[in-house]
Amino acid sequence: MTVTLPAGTQYAVESRDPGYEGCLQSATFACAGKILDLREAAGSGLINLPSSTRPYGWYPGTDVPSCITPTSDPGAASVATGGAVLEHGFAPIGPKKAEYGRFSETCQNPAQNNQIRMWWLPQSKLLIVEHASTPEQDAAFDGMVASAKFS
């Protein structure tokens, strides 16, 4: 899959905070979102497969997710204390349909409470996650997923 990244971001195989691979970074946000290829990990059984119908369904890890926001980079983020599915269904990624979800996340530090969006392609095992959803960032991510091309 290839996409046109939102203006001012770059894809980082390894983010400024080690261990947060696949991050879309900008000058002010260490991890605005992620694009992850989960093919290898999905076959290992060491991750939770994404799902738009369960709290934290956007998070493939087996530990507790962090509350990543523009002011709380992954290494400085508090842990999540709760989550809920706000919206789920299907949404396009380029010419394909992805499992889509919007989630609320409550955090140990309430100033970091936020919403997260995800697009999951279960056949391709590709996951796109948008951390700390805002109208401006939603528009940027919508443009990015619309630009997706598959070969």
Image (tube, grey):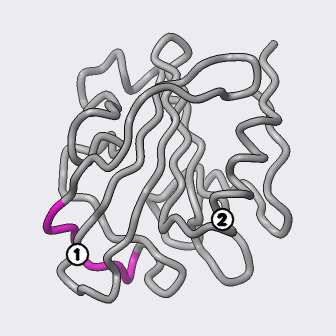
Could you say where residue 10 lies in the image, as x and y percent from the top left?
77, 60
Name the quarter where the N terminus is drawn.
top right
Residue at position x 39%, y 27% in the image? 41
Residue at position x 75%, y 26% in the image? 94
Name the quarter where the C terminus is drawn.
top right
Q: Is residue 19 left or right of residue 128?
A: left
Residue at position x 74%, y 57% in the image? 140
Q: Is residue 53 depicted above or below 58 in this figure? A: above
Which image quadrant is residue 126 in? top right
Residue at position x 34%, y 52% in the image? 103
Could you say where residue 65 lies in the image, as x and y percent from the top left?
27, 59
Q: CA distance from mark 2 to mark 1?
A: 20 Å
Front-most of 15 and 83?
83
Q: Nearer the viewer, mark 2 or mark 1?
A: 2
Front-most of 103 and 72?
103
Q: Amino acid under label 1?
A: Cys
10 Å crowding of disc 1: few (<14), some (14-19), many (20+): many
Q: Which residue, as the protein is rendered here, is positioned at the far left?
A: 81
Q: Which residue is mark 1?
A: 107
10 Å crowding of disc 2: few (<14), some (14-19), many (20+): some
Front-most of 126 and 14?
126
Could you say where residue 39 lies in the image, as x and y percent from the top left?
48, 20
* Region rendered in magenta: 75-82
Q: Is residue 137 depicted above or below 43 in this figure? A: below
Q: What SS does tag 1 mark?
A: strand
Q: Which residue is mark 2?
A: 137
